Amino acid sequence: MSFHASAQDITLQSADRLHLLTANLRKMDGTYSISQLNLDTCIGNNDGNFEWGGENFSHSMPLGEVELVFEGDDHQPILHAFLKKMDGERKEARINLAERIGNEDGKFVFSRLVLFIFV
């Protein structure tokens, strides 16, 4: 299950090169627990584009130039940043965190496969 449908207080905490997705995630028993995921462990930069399964996307952008925005009627969690391309230019990039980050009993999990949400 995509995490944002079962989460409260979703934030992106940034310090130096560390970008932690933090939220209170609902567990199977209905209670909530605080969970964190370092986004640099599952998202990389491929010539100015975010790339699932990569690492260290933040190493190719200026400090503090990343933002988590909730978009659309269903409040999809979209990460925005200006990433460096191979030619040195910067490019605006965005990635929907709900595509690959889920909630497994109150803990963030990264899936290498696209998560499907059935409504």
Image (cartoon, helix red, strand yellow):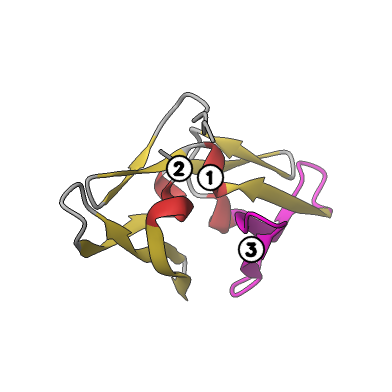
**How far is the residue under mark 2 from the one under mark 1?**
5 Å
Tell me if mark 1 has few (under 14), some (14-19) or many (20+) residues whose alpha carbon lies within 10 angstroms of its own: many
Q: Mark 2 points at which residue?
A: 2
Residue at the left extreme of this rendering? 29
CB under 8 Å between discs 2 and 1: yes
Give 108 or 83, whichever is nearer the viewer. 108
90 on left or right of 101: right
Give 59 or 34, whichever is nearer the viewer. 34
- Quarter of the picture containing the C terminus is top right
Classify mark 1: helix, strand or loop.
helix
Q: Mark 1 points at which residue?
A: 98
Say which label, 2 or 3, has the lower sequence index.
Answer: 2
Q: Mark 3 points at which residue?
A: 70
Classify mark 2: helix, strand or loop.
loop
11 on left or right of 87: left
49 on left or right of 63: right
**How far is the residue under mark 1 from the one under mark 3?**
11 Å
In the image, the segment drawn in magenta is 60-89
54 on left or right of 66: left
Name which residue type carries label 3.
Phe
Tell me if mark 3 has few (under 14), some (14-19) or many (20+) residues whose alpha carbon lies within 10 angstroms of its own: some
